[in-house]
Image (tube, rainbow, N blue to C red):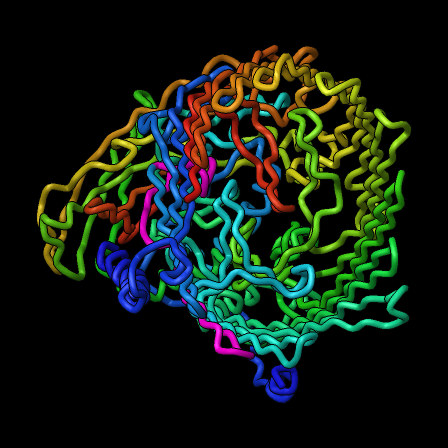
């Protein structure tokens, strides 16, 4: 392991030294290139609390402390860009919220050259095709998800309007890569139609991606498929390769904008959690590898005039599971990105139930309406609805808020959210004893600026529900003392607990528990330090449409972010 | 151009999936299932294990560990299968992504999982273990005293290769119980009368085994003895029924984080 880290460190140092040596001097001036970066670190002190279920992971039992840190360093000199990121995880609960992960090393490095019409990048690549439906390499730190492609990418500018790119590599996994080879490419353009006064702009594109399985994955799949005894469930042969295609276009005309994308996946073996498999006893149990082709249709339409703006989004997904290795589960090995179809809520209680994107069977629509009712009064209303292709409701949300700016000192926001959330599907709980969670959540947010430097923000939310944990109340006060300090205190209380939810451990079920948080933030220039005492209830945490179930947290969190 | 290459090269020779063949091996593989009565997906794992037991017969020893995660009793449960050592073992078999999960001979087949959470893969890992190097034979000879409820356990070890002291070989002896009727969540509901088999109930050694503290030599038989007294069931309970109980023993390593199981054996307390 140490050898591996040293080898990567040497490679990264070599990258940097090459370019620093060739630069006349290491300065921030234009001639000497530019050096910039960012640092982010979280330190968690775990305090065991059996009342909320913050127990039984190594951090609570004996490790007591965990930390994650990322240091990004980038250097640009003329036509060359190089960069690296040092990652550190010490008894971290980020990778597996129920476990402990320790490792460190060079998590990412790259070199990029601009050779006129051609630019090339080697190392770790973050990129996407279209909206990411067939390929997206990106990083979600809150979930320790980083599926960068480790390989090479060429991009050629055919002319001012058209670009073609191709890439190949293996998907990054922590400090290693998965074995499968991913390759693909796209052609992206720009076309202007109509008159100069009323132009119609088109941004079309076409992409293709392919995965070649490793021998090991094929062997694992063969072993899994061998046990299927029912003729209708058997798969007689499997392929090493699969292919995905996508055509997409953005059309803008005046205040209209319309994006549309259609994607197709060639027949591929993947694990369908809802398909049943027949065992030798004749029992049918869920979870079977199937061989199906897949499709995604996705569109967004937006229109805005002076006082009103509307965005309509729709998506249909069928059998579009695409992983670098089909034997992986949860967030492991995902190659593509299916856009989430609900509002990205930010308040504590309105964001408590977030639906994860379904890749086997989903159709959804979302409408977002923003309007100015008067000079000081504006509002927004959002509606989203998600169901399976068979018509089972997965998620429904109506969210509406009004914002009133009384004067420069006082701003008020108030609204209500109505949700229906299929907890059985999203969290894998037994359907007959897990009714859909239905919530009504009114909320308000008041910001008062005493002076230019002193402000107070107060939030209050109430979630009324009979399901899951029952009803909650949440309140927060945040005092801002610009430019350096900010203090906050908040609390969440299970005001009417659900006493007979079998999905909650008996030790915690039906208890009225107060979850306080308090702390402060100090900012100085580009550096920000925060220290918080946190008690947090178990819940689903989503980042960029990817979600996972997080256990309760009890402890102290210290965070540093810095850019330079 | 890229697109043209894709289309040109997309014809390939498919890999056939043969029917499951018979595997003949002297090895007896240990499969430790991490399960729980409040785990709706766990019956899927249990069905998979029944299938594996049907395929591999005496070559496979199964233990169902109700440790902690999703193992709390349902409102319909009569019993609580959890106990502190089972929880310690569940933590010892980390990392895993979720339940059901199973460790096959405690070998890390997947980079980030010692216990594999995809039941579809267990068949391949059991087969791999049956085809890997066989180093030792293990047999159990039990004697049960009905009056004292004491089980005398003789574990007979016959190596087919040498084991040095530096390998720190350990023996773990587990006490299991089957045919327990109690509640279990499944993907749709709570089944009130679900049959729980191979439930880990206790240990006759420490949960992480007892060091043998001797060298083992090729073809030189050694016998190790242990004993266990079966508790009396509490009033109204049908647990701790010797007729439904079995002893599982296995030899494993415990050096530098190595947890590999070399060989397992099982025997019913009352044949």
Residue at figure coordinates x 29%, y 37% from the top left: B173
Q: Main secondary structure of the magenta part?
A: strand
Image quadrant holding the N terminus of chain A, namely: bottom left
Q: Is residue A410 visible?
A: yes
Rendered view: B120 above or below A134: above
Q: Position of residue B239 (x, y in %)?
A: 48, 24
Drawn side of residue B77 relative to residue A561, left or right: right
Rendered view: A178 above or below A357: below
Q: Could you tell me how many numbered marks the image carries?
A: 0
Q: Position of residue A281 (x, y in %)?
A: 62, 53
Image quadrant holding the C terminus of chain A, namely: top left
Residue at figure coordinates x 40%, y 50% from the top left: A72
Q: Position of residue A243 (x, y in %)?
A: 64, 74
Residue A9 lies in the magenta stretch: no
In which quarter of the view is residue A378 placed? Answer: top right
Query: Which one is in front, A121 or B243?
Result: A121
Rendered view: A370 above or below A294: above
Drawn side of residue A248 relative to residue A105, left or right: right
Residue at figure coordinates x 46%, y 21% from the top left: A532
Q: Is residue A492 visible?
A: no
Drawn side of residue A192 relative to residue A491, left or right: right
Query: Which one is in front, A461 or A377?
Result: A377
Rendered view: A97 above or below B136: above
Query: Which one is in front, B92 or A537?
Result: A537
Residue A104 lies in the magenta stretch: yes
Question: Range of the magenta residues?
Answer: A91-119
Q: Position of residue A404 (x, y in %)?
A: 81, 22
Residue at figure coordinates x 89%, y 38% from the top left: A307
């Amino acid at each position: 392991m140490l050898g591996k880290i040293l080898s990567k460190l040497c490679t990264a140092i070599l990258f940097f030294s090459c370019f620093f040596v060739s630069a006349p001097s290491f300065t921030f001036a234009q001639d000497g290139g530019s050096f910039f970066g960012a640092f982010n670190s979280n330190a968690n002190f775990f305090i065991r609390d059996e009342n909320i279920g913050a127990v039984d992971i190594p951090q609570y039992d004996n490790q007591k402390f965990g930390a994650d840190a990322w240091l990004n360093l980038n250097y640009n000199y003329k036509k060359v860009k190089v960069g690296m990121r040092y990652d550190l995880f010490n008894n971290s609960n980020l990778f597996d919220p129920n476990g402990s992960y320790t490792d460190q090393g060079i998590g990412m490095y790259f070199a990029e050259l601009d050779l006129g019409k051609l630019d090339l990048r080697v190392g770790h690549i973050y990129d996407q095709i279209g909206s990411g439906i067939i390929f997206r390499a990106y990083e979600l730190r809150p979930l320790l998800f980083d599926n960068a492609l480790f390989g090479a990418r060429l991009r050629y500018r055919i002319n001012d309007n058209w670009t073609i790119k191709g890439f190949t590599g293996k998907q990054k996994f922590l400090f290693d890569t998965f074995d499968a080879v991913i390759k693909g490419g796209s052609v992206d353009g720009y076309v202007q139609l109509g008159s100069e006064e009323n132009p119609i702009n088109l941004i079309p594109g076409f992409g293709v991606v392919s995965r070649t399985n490793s021998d090991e994955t094929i062997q694992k799949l063969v072993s899994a498929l061998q046990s299927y005894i029912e003729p209708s469930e058997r798969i007689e042969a499997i392929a090493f390769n699969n292919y995905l295609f996508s055509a997409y276009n953005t059309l803008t005309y005046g205040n209209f904008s319309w994006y549309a994308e259609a994607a197709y996946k060639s027949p591929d073996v993947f694990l369908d959690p809802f398909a049943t498999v027949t065992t030798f006893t004749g029992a049918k149990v869920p979870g079977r590898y199937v061989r199906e082709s897949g499709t995604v249709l996705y569109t967004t339409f937006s229109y805005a005039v002076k006082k009103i703006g509307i965005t309509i989004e729709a998506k249909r997904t069928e059998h579009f599971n695409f992983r670098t290795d089909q034997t992986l589960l949860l967030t492991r090995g995902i190659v593509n990105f299916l856009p989430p179809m609900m509002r990205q809520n930010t308040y504590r209680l309105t964001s408590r139930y977030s639906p994860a994107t379904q890749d086997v069977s989903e159709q959804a629509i979302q409408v977002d309406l923003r309007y100015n009712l008067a000079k000081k009064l504006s509002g927004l209303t959002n509606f989203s609805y998600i169901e399976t292709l068979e018509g089972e409701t997965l998620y429904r949300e109506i969210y509406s808020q009004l914002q009133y700016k009384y004067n420069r000192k006082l701003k008020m926001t108030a609204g209500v959210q109505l949700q229906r959330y299929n907890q059985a599907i999203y969290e894998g709980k037994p359907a007959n004893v897990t009714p859909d969670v239905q919530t009504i959540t009114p909320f308000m947010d008041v910001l008062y600026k005493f002076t230019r430097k002193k402000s107070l923000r107060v939030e209050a939310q109430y979630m009324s529900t009979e399901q899951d944990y029952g009803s909650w109340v949440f309140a927060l006060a945040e005092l801002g003392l610009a430019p350096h300090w900010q203090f906050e205190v908040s609390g969440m209380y299970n005001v009417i607990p659900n006493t007979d939810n079998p999905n909650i451990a008996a030790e915690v079920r039906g208890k009225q528990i107060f979850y306080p948080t308090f702390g402060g933030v100090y900012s100085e220039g580009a550096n920000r330090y925060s220290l918080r005492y946190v008690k947090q209830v178990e819940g689903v945490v989503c980042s960029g449409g990817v979600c996972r179930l997080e256990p309760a947290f009890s402890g102290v969190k210290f965070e540093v972010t810095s850019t330079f | 151009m890229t697109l043209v290459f894709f289309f040109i090269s997309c014809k390939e020779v498919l890999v056939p999936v043969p029917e499951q063949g018979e595997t003949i091996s002297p090895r007896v593989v240990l499969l430790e299932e991490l399960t729980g009565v409040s785990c709706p997906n766990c019956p899927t794992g249990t069905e998979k294990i029944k299938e594996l037991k049907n395929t591999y017969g005496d070559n496979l020893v199964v233990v169902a560990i109700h440790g902690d995660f999703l193992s709390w009793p349902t409102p319909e449960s009569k019993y609580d299968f959890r106990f502190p050592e089972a929880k310690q073992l569940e933590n010892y078999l980390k990392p895993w992504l979720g339940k059901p999960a199973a460790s096959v001979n405690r070998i890390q087949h997947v980079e980030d999982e010692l216990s594999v959470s995809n039941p579809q893969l267990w068949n391949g890992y059991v087969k791999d273990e049956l085809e890997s190097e066989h180093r030792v034979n293990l047999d159990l000879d039990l004697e049960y005293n009905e009056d004292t409820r004491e089980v005398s356990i003789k574990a007979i070890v016959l190596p087919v290769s040498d084991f040095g002291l530096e390998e720190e070989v350990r023996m773990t002896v587990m006490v299991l119980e089957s045919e327990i009727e109690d509640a279990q969540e499944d993907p749709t509901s709570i089944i009130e009368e679900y049959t729980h088999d191979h439930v880990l109930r206790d240990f006759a050694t420490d949960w992480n085994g007892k060091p043998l503290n001797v060298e083992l030599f090729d073809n030189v038989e050694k016998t190790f003895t242990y004993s266990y007294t079966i508790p009396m069931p509490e009033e109204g309970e049908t647990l701790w029924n010797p007729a439904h109980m079995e002893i599982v023993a296995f030899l494993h390593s415990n050096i530098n984080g190595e947890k590999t199981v070399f060989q397992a054996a099982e025997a019913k307390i009352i044949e």
